[in-house]
Image (cartoon, grey):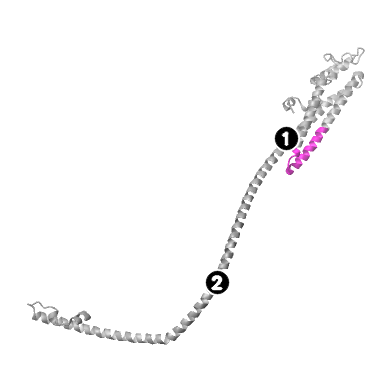
Amino acid sequence: MNMQRLASVPIWAQFCSPGPAISAIPAQREVGRQQNRGPHRVDMSTVAHDRSRPGTAYVFASIDARQYHQHDQDSSIVKEELQRYGKKVDAMNAQSQALAIEKAHLRSQIATLTANVADKDKKLERMRAKSANTNSKHDDADTELNDLPFKSAQKDTRIAKLEEDLKQANEGWRYYHQKSEAARTDRDILRSECESLRSSMHASEAEMKSKDKQIAKLQASNQSWKGSYDQWMKKLTGEAADMQGQIESLQPEREALFSTMDKRKEQIARLERKSGKVIGEARKWKRKWKEAWASHNRDSDATDENLNIPENILSQTNL
């Protein structure tokens, strides 16, 4: 719908106005009434198309085929536009069902108002046709004409409110559409994550099956090894028992050997003590021999060989 063209014309004028000459109705109404009430009564059939004469403009102001044709086109365009918006609103998701119901109700009200306006136009035409022949009904027609602007203003306010409600419904549909798009995006992301997790799960299951096969193989090998181990341990246990018997049989001999060793150690200790005393005496006598021979052979080359001490004694006693 060409909204720019209709925006310059009031909505009540689109449905109810007979044309641009409606502004001349209040000023010319009384003049026409006076001219049609007297001995010189105006013949309306002779001035049917002469709008310049006083008293005729308000009668024929709206009898214009082009304006009514344009009015019908605008009404059909408005209806088509409302139907198109209704179809868009009906396509909203479950969260906007309340708005769709309200819009359907508003569309029915608009259709009712449009029908009422059409009925008012028909009534106005009938009253204007009757006023051409009968002047007694001018007062009723004037009253009806005086009420029409007020009623049209009320209808204009109502239609403006309906348009505002329709705008809010469209905004709500747009908001829920954005929400649904975001939810669809989140759903796609979750779906891809689920697919990735499913692939990982399948890979884990395959790996688990491989591990189960390895475990079964190891268990079979373990059972075989355990049988060999049991036989080997049984053999070792028998050999250990035999060795323990031999150890127990050799234990008295071992104790006797330890007793003999202890006695030998005591004998060795006594001999070492005696040899220590002998070595001390030998060192003392060696020192005395050296002093005696030193004083006797001071002028000669006296050595240990001159002392006549056997070599083996010197080496064994560390003299």
Label 1 or label 2, whichever comes before in sequence order: 1
Expressed as whole percent of the image width and height from the top left, the position of residue 227 reads 55, 73
Q: Say which of marks 1 and 2 sits in front.
A: 2
Magenta segment range?
88-111
Name the disc covering residue 177, or none: none
Residue 161 in view in this figure:
no
What residue is shown with label 1? 167
Amino acid type, callout 1: Lys
Outermost residue, left side: 299
Q: Residue visible at 51% across and 76% down?
A: 233
Quadrant of the snapshot with the C terminus: bottom left
Tag 2: Cα neighbours inside 10 Å, few (<14), some, or many (≥20)? few
Name the disc covering residue 226, or none: 2
Residue 111 in view in this figure:
yes
**Looking at the picture, does residue 295 appear above or below residue 125?**
below
Q: Quadrant of residue 80?
A: top right
Most frequent secondary structure within the magenta stretch: helix
Q: CA distance from mark 1 to mark 2?
A: 85 Å
Q: Quadrant of residue 32?
A: top right
Q: Is residue 247 left or right of residue 21?
A: left
Q: Residue visible at 88% across and 21% down?
A: 128
Quadrant of the snapshot with the N terminus: top right
Verify whether residue 29 appears in magenta.
no
Q: Quadrant of residue 112?
A: top right
Verify whether residue 105 appears in magenta.
yes
- The residue lying toward the viewer, choosing from 252 and 89, is 252
- The residue lying toward the viewer, choosing from 249 and 115, is 249
